[in-house]
Image (cartoon, rainbow, N blue to C red):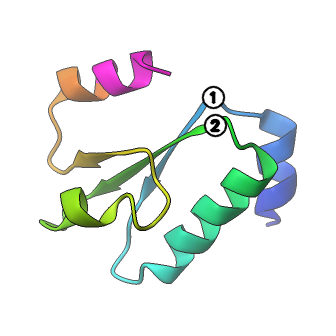
Amino acid sequence: MDPSSKITSFKPDLVILDLFQDYLRPLALSRLIRSLLPSTGLIASSCNPDISQIFKKLGFDDYLSKPFDIDHLINLVNSY
């Protein structure tokens, strides 16, 4: 799968990416999305307790801690 073609053909307003144990993949994806669609919002989702300290370093605009509050998710999505 080529993420570049999927991202540019769909042109999302917002992308929510799950952070895995390995941060290299989400870091590469966030950089790819930023380069192709700089105005697209990026939200990191993780159960990692350090997410509030690392989401900006990985290129995300905001974060969603797991388990997440549905109202918080709705508010984040509505802000984009």
Residue at horizontal 35 percent and vertical 59 percent from the top:
55
Amino acid carrying mark 2 in the image: Thr
Say if the magenta span includes residue 41. Answer: no
Residue at horizontal 38 percent and vertical 66 percent from the top:
19
Do tag 2 and tag 1 residues touch (Cβ < 8 Å)? yes
Could you tell me how many numbered marks the image carries? Answer: 2
> Splitting the image into 4 quarters, where does residue 62 fall?
top left
Residue 54 picture location, percent across and down: 30, 66
Residue 36 as seen in the image, left or right of residue 73: right
Amino acid carrying mark 1 in the image: Asp
Query: Compared to 52, does 41 lie above or below?
Result: above
In magenta, the rendered stretch is 74-80
Residue 77 picture location, percent across and down: 42, 24
> Is disc 2 placed on a helix, strand or loop?
loop
> Is disc 1 placed on a helix, strand or loop?
loop
Query: Compared to 3, does 8 lie above or below?
Result: above
Q: Which residue is mark 1?
A: 13
Label 2 vs 1, first from the N-terminus: 1
User: Residue lying furthest top in this view?
Assistant: 78
- The answer for how far apart the CA atoms under marks 2 and 1 are is 5 Å
Residue 8 as seen in the image, left or right of residue 33: right
Residue 11 picture location, percent across and down: 77, 34
Q: Which residue is mark 2?
A: 40
Residue at horizontal 50 percent and vertical 22 percent from the top:
80
Residue 13 picture location, percent across and down: 63, 28
- Determine the main secondary structure of the stretch shown in magenta: helix
Identify which residue, 1 or 33, lies in the foreground.
33
| Picture quarter with the N terminus | bottom right
Residue 6 as seen in the image, left or right of residue 33: right
Q: Which label was assigned to residue 75?
A: none
